[in-house]
Amino acid sequence: MTRRIQKTVPDIETLEDFHIAAYLVEDECGECLLSLAHQMEVHHNPLMAELFERLADMRKRSAAEIFAAMEPEWRKNIYMRDLRWLGESCPGAVDILSAHYRMQPWHGYRLALSAFDRIHDFYDEIAVETENDAVRRHAIDLRARIAADIRALEEELATIPEPEAAWDHDDDPPMIQE
Amino acid sequence: MSDTPQDNAAARESVSVAITGSGGAGVITAGEMLLAAAAHAGWHGIQTRSVGPQIRGGEAVSMVRLATFPVEAHDDAFHLLVAVDWRNFDRFAAEVLLAQGGLVIMDKAAGDVPPPLKERAGKILSLPLSKAAKEAGSRVNMVALGCIAALLGIPESSLEHAARRRFAAKGEKLVEASLAGLRAGRDLTMQEDLADHIANLRLDRPEKPDKPRWIVSGNQMAGLGAVHAGVRFVAAYPITPASDLLEWMTPVLSAEGGMLVQAEDELASINMIIGSSFGGVPSMTATSGPGLALMMEGLGLAVSAEIPVVVVNVQRGGPSTGIPTKSEQTDLNIALCGMHGEAPHLVLAPLSAADCLFTTAWAVELAEALQAPAIVLSDQKIAQMKAISDPLPLPAVKVARKVSEACAPHAYKRYALTEDGVSPMALPGTPGCMYTADGLEHGENAVPSSRAEDHAAMLEKRARKLRNHDYGPAWAEVNGEGEIAVICWGSTAGPVHEAARVLAREGISIRTVSMRLLSPLPIEALEETLAGVKTLIVAENSHSGQFLHYLRAWCDLPQEVISLKHAGPRPITAPEVRRAVIDAIGGGRMQESNIALKEAPVS
Amino acid sequence: MNEAMRKPNDFKSGVKPIWCPGCGDYGVLSALTKAFARLNCAPEKIAVVSGIGCAARIPAYVNAYGLHGLHGRALPAAAGLKLARPELTVIAAGGDGDIYSIGGNHFIHACRRNVDMTLIVMDNRIYGMTKGQPSPTTEPDYPTHLYPAGTHVQPLDGMSLALVAGANFVARAFTGDPNDLAEIIVEAIRHPGFSVIEVLSPCVTFRPEEREWKHQIARHALTPAGSVAEALAAVASAPELSTGIVWKGNRPPYTGPGDQAGKRVQDVLDSFVA
Ligand SMILES: Cc1ncc(C[n+]2csc(CCOP(=O)(O)OP(=O)(O)O)c2C)c(N)n1
Ligand code: SF4
Ligand SMILES: [Mg+2]
């Protein structure tokens, strides 16, 4: 896969830069997916809640491993940088606006995959362009990992039927609240 | 006293004087100086005013009552009426009733005496007040005041003291001019043969007080009570007759490290103080009927989110814009029942101008202790009245909000169902207790809930904390014994107390119950207090009898209930109360056993 | 806990939002928690004050002190809190109806008063909470159940109103870009005085077509202008869905009326002596 993200990668020169960026990207993706899991739980779509939770877990685990590999001093700096540093909307961000309370696994996989793909492209771009050997090594490792995750998801997606046309239909109107 | 007020006392323990004029004559100042001079000399008294709708130059009347004993209300007639002119005097005719045989002094150039006065006056004296003022290089109000002081026997030293206090800041020249005017007024009076009238108007010598007396207004005392009790944040929108309360508070608050913010409207006022009180700072607003109406939704939020706030509502004639400059006791219904849903809260009412100090401070104490909004129902009459008072002690209120210590994450329950219903409130800044105060119904942990059980539990908690609180004896001023009782609330206490005093001298003992705490209604204490009473007179300054209906809804009232009520701007007067008592006795109605609601005749 | 290690998650309350899946307000919540982490604020030193509406539900989802008050009244409540407790970081939040319609007067006066706090207006051009009635920012021809043929009323331009009324920091952001929004929130909080951020936040239930905003946003088409007049011109000429900070003023924040030459209670008693 050689899809490129639109924006050039942030200035990543040191391993610290890279670890922080990678952590933020993976964590963002995990958090978005977890938020989607909660959205589905509250709106009584348990199948999707479970799926999103599992997907979130993939990225959260990756983030945790990156975090564990960091020098302790680096961890203090994670949120000290301008978040726009990660480029025009973070590569890990999931398009939450596309979510729907009646969405089905087919939608969920595709939503996650589009974020996973952008993460892959992010690592790919760094691996290709960095001049720092340590950074390149780590980028290649993480690229391999997300590539494996993507492959796994794509395989699962292939077994899932496309939703019928009126998948989002709800006989009831929206409910008035406050 | 009889139904037609007579002016026949020889020497007086109480005398009432009205000064009227228009176009910048300065009669309000003259009245205030008369009061100040009397206070300096040791008398008691009050001064109120009534004015036309103009901002400047309108017709005005300054009404002063001086006495050898503490007074909180006007008599029902004036013994002396001084007119600089008669322009639009008819506007005040109902408020300024001349005693039969009373003395009228008017400027020679004032024109024709209004006919009703002609009939009642014992003597009408035209004096060249304006001319004398011109000759003395002074102003007509000072000449008029000089006349009055001479007739009443106010010592010149006290008059001079009052003039100096009033004008010193404006320069010695003005002081001298004023003194010249006062002298001219005295000289004019002394030239006349007024021996009979002087005998009638002259006040008994007062007992000299140990300490110099104060002159207070209800609005000042409410402000003082609030700041003394610890209010440090006020947000408000100007409205008559609450604005002077706000003006009094601004500098004092700034000196005490607090602040007063002028809000863009009353919706902002109430929500600003909800915000500041949520932050832990005792907070208050002041307003009048139209503003109170706008605040209702905010007050409901304060009930639900359990955020203490105090609203001093200075009542004026309603509904709508009503009669902004005059008094009425008709915001009782909205204060009690104006909020939607079931919203237990505190409603208190000061009994006099001086009592605004205690009642407002108490309201702050209760609101803070019970984490509930408190509405203080003052009214224009006492709020803008100037009253002579012995120096007032700052009330010993204990203002303490139950706050929460820091706690472990997710352990804090903002709306914990405690036994007394009051839950420790975490103030922003307290680690671990982060919660969202909510006007949506909620559970103990403050998370919104529409569950029936949560709603029932919270309604009960919010009612319980008010119901079970020990309010002590301050809920009412209860005096006297007898099978006839007069019950009233707020500023009607003044005339009721005075009527009781007069009746006692006539050998008639009554019980008076002047209520300061209106919500929660202390039903048990009230029923206990009324035990043995056969006739209850309910006195209130309301056309519809809001107070009576409230009492009837909640209390077992005595056999016979008489409603003494009428609308503002005429206040309930002591003679009206007295008459109602005499009628109740005379009518032999006390023997009747069925509950009868009768309207007491009103002059 | 390591002071330097506050994470966005530390600012989530754990209460799961009731917003529709896909709602733009999730992005605002995410951005807000990121901004707090970036600013490294202690959660107990933050207060989020709101009115009523979908957007206004946000305080309960943030791990901070919150006040979920009345429809339209977030701004005065927030101002009261900030004036009384100046050391707190105060955020006011609400929807386009909450802030621009029922709270419109407070919005104007909050701008001119310039209390040091940050307002986040989640603009979805509709009343979400009450089922899709038109709001002050709804397009005149947009059909709703209430007006199937549109309102024929001109939308309110909140950004320009904020500029004219005196807000000290004015920006627009898009919820679909939470990192950018987070940074704008950080700047708004750091900037003294009253900061207004209008966030384009789609209502996927009543205005599903707003999902397409993500393809229509003119990112950072707005940049800080040299004067209010230039800022107004920039807002007027920029594409409709422009984001960016358009104004950073330097008016001093309002902290109260200051010293009013008064006396303390004990000293003022003398003034009552006759
Ligand atoms: C005084 C009052 N009037 C009306 C309502 C009903 N109400 C609740 S939310 C709302 C509109 C919310 O729209 P908006 O502020 O745009 O927020 P959104 O739900 O779109 O986020 C209305 C009219 C109310 N709660 N209180
Ligand atoms: S109705 Fe609209 S604004 Fe409200 S939660 Fe749903 S999507 Fe969001
Ligand atoms: Mg909206």
Image (spheres, coloured by chain):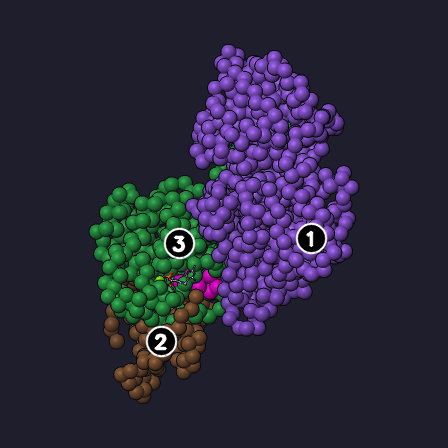
Chain colours: A brown, B purple, C green
Q: Quadrant of residue B2?
A: top right
Name the residue type under label 3.
Gly
Q: What's the chain of the residue with tag 2?
A: A
The stretch in magenta equals: C55-64
Q: Residue furthest top?
A: B135
Residue C103 numbered mark, or none: 3
Magenta part, dominant SS? helix
- For the question of whether residue B453 can be seen, the reply is yes
Check disc 1 and give the amino acid type.
Answer: Leu
Q: Are the residues flagged by discs 3 and 1 in contact, CB closer than 8 Å?
A: no
Quadrant assignment for the C terminus of chain C: top right
Q: Secondary structure at mark 1?
A: strand
Q: Amino acid at mark 2?
A: Pro
Q: Are marks 1 and 2 on the same chain?
A: no
Residues packed near mark 3 inside 10 Å, few (<14), some (14 to 19) or many (20 plus): many
**Residue placed under numbered mark 2 in the picture:** A173
Q: Nearer the viewer, residue B353 or C22?
A: B353
Same-chain status of marks 3 and 2: no
CA distance separating discs 1 and 2: 59 Å
User: Could you say whether the residue bearing mark 3 is in a helix, strand or loop?
Assistant: loop
Vertical position of residue C33 compared to residue B112: above or below? below
Tell me which residue sits at (43%, 52%) in the image. C75
Q: Label 2: few (<14), some or many (≥20) within 10 Å?
A: few
The CA distance from mark 3 to mark 2 is 28 Å
Residue at the spot of label 1:
B536
Residue C57 painted magenta: yes
